Amino acid sequence: MLRRAIYTLFGSFVLIIATALIVVRCPSISVPPSERLTTYSDEPYRRVLTACVRDGLVDYHQLRAEYGDELHQYLDAIGRFGPNSTPDLFPTHDHRLAYYLNAYNALMLRKWLDGGAGMGGEPKTVNRLWFFTNFWRVDGSWTSLDKLEQSLIRPTFKEPRIHVALVCGAMGCPPLLEEPLVSERLDEQLDGLGRRWLGEPDGLQVRDDGTVLMSGIFSWYREDFDAMGGLLGVLERYLDPDDRRREVAIAAARQGRIEFMDYDWSINQALPIESTAPRE
């Protein structure tokens, strides 16, 4: 036990040192002055998502070839406007939460483009150092994706449903919504994503032998879901009464028999349009 503790401590120390040495402040998004938004709007991001997201996955080839300018226009706005910089534009809790969730997901799209997605021969899995070592301008300040989630979104909003909306660019993530999150329908959108994700094998699996597995995200952030009544509350809320898996999954949650899947870090790349098939 002591040797294992020493190895764990040493490994954590090495990771911290390595991360500190390779922190990268990503360049400001370059948008011609004539194309910069004069106020915050998610319309460029809406065009990106509508065109490039299919079945919750991203067509990075199309994003790179046809919609990079719209993505950069939106990210430029994310850097200049926000709840702290321009609070009058984000008057409510839901305005602010939708802003930060959209910012995170849009930055992850940009990071995959920086990593070579959409060029052919792109990397196959998410580089997890991206979350710690790359810093972006959001709401007038520099932040990493990890800091945005763990130091701002989670503690500020205390909303467990962020975990069905934040998309880290991997197949194990929840599906990316085909439209921006918006304050007027945020509750509806978050609940819709929860139902949708648990309807897919990446979110929930009920096997023939009665084994019930949920995404590893429900294990990592289990304490956050206590606000929804724990895993039992999540299943009761998001599994339809006519879903044949509901009874078995709820029984497993009540008996403490929920297991968790290994996380799939492979890129959330959509299939080409001509060969589009359901997520597996």
Image (spheres, grey):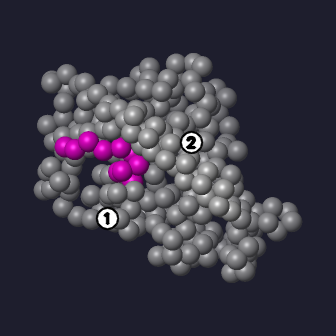
Horizontal arrangement in the rendering, residue 87 relative to residue 8 (left or right): left
* Residue 236 visible, this orientation: no
Occupied quadrant, residue 268: top right
Nearer the observer, 149 or 102 = 149
Q: Residue at coordinates 18% horizontally, 35% vertically from top-left?
A: 37
Task: Tell me: residue 172, above or below residue 255.
Answer: above
User: Measured from the top left, where is residue 203 in percent x and y?
Assistant: 63, 57
Determine the secondary structure under disc 1. helix
User: Measured from the top left, where is residue 154 in percent x and y?
Assistant: 38, 62
Nearer the observer, 91 or 115 = 115
Horizontal arrangement in the rendering, residue 129 relative to residue 209 (left or right): left
Nearer the observer, 25 or 15 = 15
Neighbour class for label 1 at 10 Å: few (<14), some, many (≥20)?
few
Is residue 144 a member of the stretch shown in magenta?
yes
User: Measured from the top left, where is residue 227 in percent x and y?
Assistant: 47, 76
> Which quadrant is home to the N terminus?
bottom right
Task: Tell me: residue 59, above or below residue 171.
Answer: above
Residue at the disc numbered 1 = 156
The amino acid type, in three-letter code, at marker 2 is: Ala
Horizontal arrangement in the rendering, residue 38 relative to residue 112 (left or right): left
The amino acid type, in three-letter code, at marker 1 is: Thr
Q: Which numbered dot is residue 86? A: none
Which residues lie in the magenta part? 140-149
Is residue 217 a member of the stretch shown in magenta?
no
Sequence-first disc among 2 and 1: 1
Q: Residue at coordinates 55% horizontally, 37% vertically from top-left?
A: 126
Residue at the disc numbered 2 = 170
User: Measured from the top left, where is residue 120 in percent x and y?
Assistant: 57, 18
Q: Residue at coordinates 56% horizontally, 75% vertically from top-left?
A: 230
